[in-house]
Structure formats: structure tokens, C-alpha cells
Image (cartoon, rainbow, N blue to C red):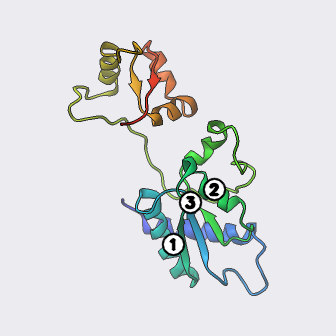
């Protein structure tokens, strides 16, 4: 993971400034105690590693401890729930992916409001979505993959299947139009 340290420092500075403005900063100055970065994923994953890098640099900049609090579970909703229920004082920060934006449409009931209970501070990193498959698959492009899916539908459904993340993309990010463009419908299947 290549991280531009100048951009990271600027991001951290903006995040810190936003926390000060958003929270109720006390007279003794912010920050004067431990800052907690909540990550709604398991330790060791990409977001957790990024949080550790940010936390280390942030701690160095503000001269206060920064703790990474991994809260995996409930489809990535345990972490946001903990942050939504914490005091809005700038000491608890959520580091999430763009999955936070789709939580409201994916779950009928959440213990928090994904829009009203959070204030976006900054984008920390930009990533890309990609289509990946087994090296044994003969397709080497999206067009070839769609043709292969049309030619070999799974028997019980008579149409191609894709993993659960595909269902999320299909419903919320607009991957569905690709299937329509190629005159094809799809069905979700859980990953193996």
C-alpha cells in the first residue's frame, strides 16, 4: 500500500481540526487524552492497517495516545454503532469504507442513522473496485467473463451466479446495468 505522507499529514490535520470544531472542546485544549479510532473490521485487514498507520502519525502529531479499536461484526455495523453512541467530543473517530454509505439501504433496521449520526471529515484513501476470478477461468476481460457466464449458467438457476459482494454492488452501486447491457440477468450465491 503506497501512501503519500504529505497527503496523510494533511488529512490527519483536517480530521483533527474537524474533530475540534465538531466536538465540545474543553478549556484545557484538545486533545488532552486518548483518541480512539474505531474500525468496523477485524485486525490485520486493509482498513485496520491503514488505521494503525494513521493512528501512529496522529499520535506523533498531537502528542496523545491513539488507540485502534477493531469492532468487526454485524456486517460492519458494530463499529459505527459504537461511534454513534459515543459522546460527540472528537475523541472517538470512525474509519470506515464506502460500505457505510449503503448501510441504510442494505439493512431494514439499524441502531444508528448512517446519515444523521455521522459527520464526514475527509477521504483518507481512494481505491478501485475490480472483478477477479480463478486463474483457471478462461476469461481475460469483463466482456469475455459475461460471454462465459451466458454460455455456462449454473444448472439450477439457468443464469450466471456471482458472490455476495456482487449482490451489494448490483443493488447499490450500479453494477446491475452491466448485466442489462449484455442482455443478461444474474443471481447471487454465497461465497464458498
Q: Which mark is residue 7?
A: none
Disc number placed over residue 95 in the picture, else none? 3
Give the distance between the C-alpha atoms of the residues marked 2 and 1, in whole angstroms: 18 Å
Q: Residue 166 at what x, y percent from top left? A: 46, 32
Instruction: Report whether 96 appears left or right of 24.
Output: left
Are the residues tagged 2 and 1 within 8 Å (C-beta)? Answer: no
Q: State the residue position of label 2.
A: 80
Task: Name the residue: 44% across, 63% down.
Answer: 43
| Of the image marks 1 and 3, the number of the one nearer the N terminus | 1
Image x and y of residue 100, in percent:
60, 48
Q: x, y percentage for residue 119?
A: 70, 57
Sequence-wise first label, 2 or 1: 1
Which of the 4 quarters of the picture holds residue 29? Answer: bottom right
Instruction: Check the image and report above or below for 125 versus 52.
Output: above
Residue at x-position 55% and y-position 65%: 11
Residue at x 45% of width, y 20% of height: 186
Q: How far, Cα to Cα, is label 2 from label 3? A: 9 Å
**Nearest the camera: 111 or 121?**
111
Q: Earlier in the sequence, mark 2 or mark 3?
A: 2
Q: Position of residue 109 (x, y in %)?
A: 70, 41
Amino acid at each position: 500500500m503506497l501512501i503519500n505522507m504529505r497527503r496523510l499529514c494533511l488529512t490527519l490535520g483536517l480530521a483533527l481540526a474537524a474533530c475540534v470544531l465538531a466536538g465540545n472542546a474543553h478549556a484545557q485544549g484538545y486533545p488532552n487524552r486518548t483518541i480512539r479510532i474505531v474500525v468496523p473490521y477485524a485486525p490485520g485487514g486493509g482498513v485496520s492497517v491503514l488505521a494503525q498507520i494513521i493512528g501512529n502519525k496522529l499520535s506523533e502529531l498531537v502528542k496523545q495516545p491513539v488507540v485502534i479499536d477493531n469492532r468487526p461484526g454485524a456486517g460492519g455495523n458494530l463499529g459505527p454503532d459504537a461511534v454513534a453512541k459515543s459522546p460527540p467530543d472528537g475523541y472517538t473517530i470512525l474509519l470506515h469504507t464506502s460500505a457505510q454509505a449503503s448501510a441504510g439501504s442494505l439493512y431494514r433496521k439499524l441502531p444508528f442513522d448512517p446519515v444523521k449520526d455521522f459527520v464526514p471529515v475527509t477521504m483518507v484513501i481512494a481505491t478501485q473496485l475490480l472483478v477477479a476470478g480463478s486463474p483457471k477461468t478462461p476469461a481475460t476481460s469483463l466482456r469475455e467473463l459475461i460471454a462465459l457466464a451466458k454460455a455456462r449458467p449454473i444448472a439450477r438457476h439457468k443464469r450466471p451466479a456471482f458472490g455476495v459482494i456482487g449482490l451489494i454492488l448490483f443493488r447499490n452501486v450500479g453494477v446491475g446495468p452491466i448485466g442489462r447491457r449484455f442482455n443478461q440477468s444474474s443471481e447471487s450465491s454465497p461465497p464458498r
